[in-house]
Image (cartoon, rainbow, N blue to C red):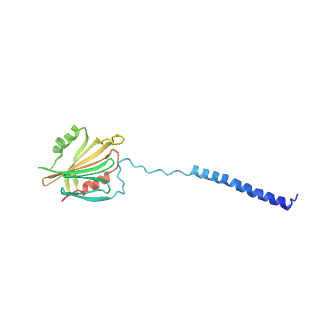
Amino acid sequence: MTLNPSCQRLLRNSAIALAFAALPCALQAAQSVLAATEQAATPEKNPPGDIPDTQVFVTYRSPAGFSLQVPEGWARKERRDGARFADKYNIVEISVAPALTAPTVSSVTAHESAELARTGHKIGAITNVSLRSGPAVLITYTSNSEPNPVTNKRLHLENHRYLIYSGGRLATLDLSAPLGADNADQWNLMSNSFQWR
């Protein structure tokens, strides 16, 4: 059977209209297939206290007679005997005091370590270490942070305390971060950057 030209035009226009009407459904189906096969990127999540590998360090020169590499941008609080640098629960604190003799593992065990233990800190180890500036004694211990002013939450902290002696002066360098943070490289950088001036 042969259709007249007007019927042919009507059928052709109807077919085009149906194709356009079906287009959104086809696009939606294609998007659904893509959404089902595409995996969402996992956001980076560092443990609290991790100092980023991209962190920039700057040299801090203290009137107390030392220099130290510290993370750029951290809040700084000057003190007469040193300084404190902080970012959230990360803390770098250093002070200098007169001392008659260099610390030893025995003297630190009897005095500094005993005082830390008395105030509730858990001592891990007391060891002799060699820094670029010379020999030092390292105390590793854990403690609780000060409560967060908003949430009142405390975190368990890992601490490294370096006792560095030279010519009647004793520098105490404290590095603290939430337990589980991976700051070994950054802490090595800072402790080895210490220099007497």
Image coordinates of residue 153 in percent, x first then y, are: 35, 40
Q: What is the quadrant of the C terminus in the image?
A: bottom left
Residue placed at 59% from the left, 52% from the top?
Answer: 34
Is residue 150 rendered to the left or right of residue 8? left
Residue placed at 80% from the left, 58% from the top?
Answer: 10
Is residue 14 rendered to the left or right of residue 55? right
The number of callouts visible is 0
Front in this rendered view, residue 60 or 156: 60
Image coordinates of residue 157 in percent, x first then y, are: 31, 43
Image coordinates of residue 115 in percent, x first then y, are: 20, 40
Residue, far bottom: 5
Q: Could you say which quadrant of the image residue 110 lies in?
A: top left
Is residue 52 rendered to the left or right of residue 38? left
Q: What is the quadrant of the N terminus in the image?
A: bottom right
Residue, far right: 1
Q: Could you say which quadrant of the image residue 140 lies in?
A: top left
Front in this rendered view, residue 101 or 143: 143
Q: Could you say which quadrant of the image residue 147 lies in?
A: top left
Front in this rendered view, residue 101 or 59: 59
Residue, far front: 150
Residue, far left: 100
